[in-house]
Amino acid sequence: MTHVPLIVIGASAGGLDALTALLSELSPKIPAAVLAVIHIGESNAKLPVFFKNRSPLPVAYAQDYDPIEPGKVYFAPPDRHLIVEDGRLRLGRGPRENHARPAVDPLFRSAAEVYGPLVTGVVLSGYLTDGTAGLWEVKRRGGVAIVQDPDEAEVPGMPSSARQHVAVDYCLGLKAIGRLLNSLADEAAKKAPRLASHGGGFDMDYTAENPVALTCTCGGALRKITKGTYTQYRCHIGHTFGTLGLATEQFEQLRGVLESAARMLNERGKFFRATASEARLGKQEQAARAWEAAAEESEVRFDELTKLVAADWKRPDLVPASGGKLKPRAPGNGEPARRAASSAMSLRKRGRSQGDAATAKRAANGRKASA
Ligand SMILES: [Zn+2]
């Protein structure tokens, strides 16, 4: 079958404003379909409502088995990966990639596999590295790779990482990207080759190759995958992380373990104090002193551990790859451990400004969605 050119777009924190600016430049007659993933997690972010009056093209959440038609914008819906098959869209609840579902990489990877040189991939604002591996595949299969200029991005992480690891064709401001997409789509539509179907879908192959002594959040063994200079880690069931994402995930787990240990020491101290009191009431003075000594030890170690939990930790995973400056973080919003929530937090702000209280409330649950 003849394929229409595809424009695949990935964005996270800061992505709503970025995508709004980009879409505003698209021609209503663009001969390409636009497929977009924004990290909304499970939150019912109502993207089609948000973009209805902000896009010159009709917008909708993708439905499973939707035919791919030019001149339309399809968003990945909450908690589903958006995947390209031959001439149609598929939705899946496959493993989270880069902590996210929907994630950018599965869309880019499947689009590249099926549509090859007819794909243009665009990575916009967001924390960490989702989209880098996908854009690398787009480029490898003859497509065009574009990133938002990290210096202009609200959150430079994603475009900065993509630019570092992929031989991108264009690094531009949003309006310029929008205008460029019109001309690229026109060119691609003219030469639209008849492509053999490859099926597409998830790359779920787990092999024992390149195992590393690291475990996934699910407990599975990880193996290392390299795409050019970009390194990914993937477990048996397909959870996938970039180096930064894995470092962030590991830190969150480490902090959780330390907090659990502190809580147990606190409990132990209180428990032993109470037990000492009971022993003393029962005239067991020697036992009482032993329980008290153990209680004191727990209290001292609780204090030490609490200091460790609260200490500053070196976090190279929070430093942008290159060419981007880390923006000051809003209190309780900018911490990349809450990266997937950040887009939702942006949504909440926008939801308020739009008076859409329901969107705001649901978007506030973004942190849970990213778990
Ligand atoms: Zn896993």
Image: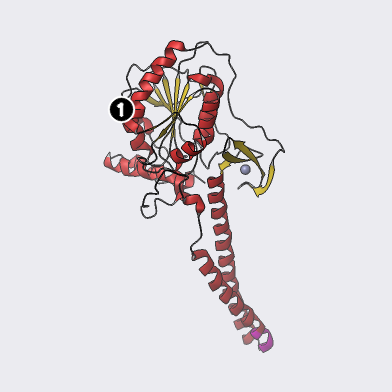
**Cβ(mark 1) to ligand 1 < 8 Å?**
no
Residue drawn at point x = 55 percent, y = 29 percent: 137
Q: Is residue 151 magenta?
A: no
When the figure is inspected, residue 34 is found, relative to residue 232, above or below; the finding is above
Magenta segment: 284-289
| Left or right relative to 308: residue 365 | left
Q: Residues within 10 Å of mark 1 (few under 14, many from 20)?
A: some
Q: Which corner quadrant of the image does residue 260 belong to?
A: bottom right
Q: Is residue 81 visible?
A: no
In x, y percent, where is residue 152? 35, 40
In x, y percent, where is residue 254? 57, 57
In x, y percent, where is residue 371? 52, 46
Residue drawn at point x = 39 percent, y = 54 percent: 332
Q: Which corner quadrant of the image does residue 32 belong to?
A: top left
Q: Is residue 286 magenta?
A: yes
Which residue in the structure is indicated by mark 1? 24
Q: Is residue 34 visible?
A: yes
Comparing 187 with 285, the one in front is 187
When the figure is inspected, residue 262 is found, relative to residue 193, above or below; the finding is below
Ligand 1 resides in the quarter of the picture at top right
Magenta stretch: helix, strand or loop mostly: helix
Q: Going by the picture, which residue comes out furthest to the right?
A: 208
Comparing 224 with 54, the one in front is 224
Residue drawn at point x = 36 percent, y = 52 percent: 328
